[in-house]
């Protein structure tokens, strides 16, 4: 068993899932993979099961009934990974918007103990987004700046979903208190890590919009993020966070 696991939530990713799994397995660092599959009607789960026969010690899957939300998928994956004593736990999209080669670049600062959480950042060195319409680039960029301003976090890409956690971080956080299920989940996790006193490091990446499959993004997801950060900031005034050692 590897000391590193990549959690990939899926819903209708039949065009991408086999390619992303094979790419991760081919990397020089041995990453295990956990697919959290939300009952995709397009057969994504069946593809993963077939590949498990080929990679029985590297590829795992949690199957859930229906589309239950990104946040709950990652929480389920975190708990599964902690039970199996993985040291480095990654979040990653299935659609190649996150380059699998960058997994090693996120692993390094955590393995060298420079950081407790490494964030694949689209905005730390300019705006590194490919194939998004300008309206969406601006919305994402200014949403991150808005979250940065309201929350006080010194992070350029506050909504990023490509991350590596050291296990101590996820053991410290009360995962059952993470409430947001959609886009705001990514903000809530970073804000909780920040409030607990862990070290966050941004690693510049190039984010490439999916070429195959259908995006899950919609206006309601952005609304949750914009209003959710105010709720997070307000609740933090009355909540005690467990501090890192």
Image (cartoon, rainbow, N blue to C red):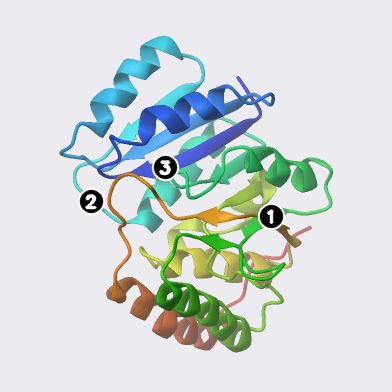
Disc 1/disc 3 C-alpha distance (Å): 20 Å
Closer-to-camera residue (30/181): 30
Please tell me whether mark 2 sits on a helix, a strand or a loop. Answer: loop
Closer-to-camera residue (134/167): 134
Q: Position of residue 214 (x, y in %)?
A: 27, 52
Q: Position of residue 242 (x, y in %)?
A: 65, 65
Task: Identify the mark nearer the N-term, 2 or 3.
Answer: 2
Please tell me whether mark 3 sits on a helix, a strand or a loop. Answer: loop
Q: What mark, if any, has residue 17 been given in the picture? A: none
- In the image, residue 46 sits, relative to residue 137, either above or below, namely above
List the single residue furthest toward the left: 41
- In the image, residue 59 sits, relative to residue 184, either above or below, namely above
Identify the residue at horizontal 42%, vertical 29% (top origin): 19
Instruction: Specify few, some or many for label 3: CA neighbours under 10 Å numbering under 14, 14-19, or 20 or more.
Output: many
Disc 1/disc 2 C-alpha distance (Å): 27 Å
Residue bearing the label numbered 2:
67
Instruction: Specify few, some or many for label 1: CA neighbours under 10 Å numbering under 14, 14-19, or 20 or more.
Output: many
Please tell me whether mark 1 sits on a helix, a strand or a loop. Answer: strand
Q: Position of residue 59 (x, y in %)?
A: 45, 23
Task: Identify the mark nearer the N-term, 1 or 3.
Answer: 3
Q: What mark, if any, has residue 94 been given in the picture? A: 3
Residue bearing the label numbered 1:
117
Quadrant showing the N terminus: top right
Q: Of circles 2 and 3, which is in front?
A: 3
- CB under 8 Å between callouts 1 and 3? no
Quadrant showing the C terminus: bottom right
């Amino acid at each position: 068993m590897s000391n590193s696991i990549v959690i990939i939530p899926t819903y209708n990713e039949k065009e991408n899932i086999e390619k992303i799994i094979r790419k991760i397995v081919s990397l020089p660092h041995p990453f295990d993979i956990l697919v959290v599959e939300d009952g995709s009607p397009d057969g994504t789960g069946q593809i993963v099961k077939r590949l498990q026969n080929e990679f029985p010690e590297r590829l795992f899957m949690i199957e859930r009934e229906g589309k239950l939300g990104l946040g709950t998928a990652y929480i389920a994956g975190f708990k599964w990974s902690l039970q199996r004593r993985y040291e480095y736990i990654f979040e990653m999209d299935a659609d190649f918007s996150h380059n699998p080669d960058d997994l090693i670049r996120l692993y390094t600062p955590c393995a060298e103990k420079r950081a407790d959480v490494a964030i694949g950042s689209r905005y730390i060195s300019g705006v590194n987004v490919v194939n998004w319409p300008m309206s969406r680039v601006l919305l994402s960029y200014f949403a991150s700046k808005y979250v940065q301003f309201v929350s006080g976090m010194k992070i350029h890409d506050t909504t990023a979903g490509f991350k590596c956690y050291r296990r101590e971080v996820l053991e410290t956080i009360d995962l059952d208190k993470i409430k947001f299920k959609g886009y705001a989940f990514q903000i809530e996790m970073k804000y909780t890590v920040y409030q607990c006193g862990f070290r966050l490091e941004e690693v510049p990446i190039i984010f490439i919009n999916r070429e195959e499959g259908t995006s899950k993004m919609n206006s309601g997801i952005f609304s949750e993020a914009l209003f959710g950060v105010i709720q997070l900031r307000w609740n933090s005034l009355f909540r005690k966070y467990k501090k890192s050692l």
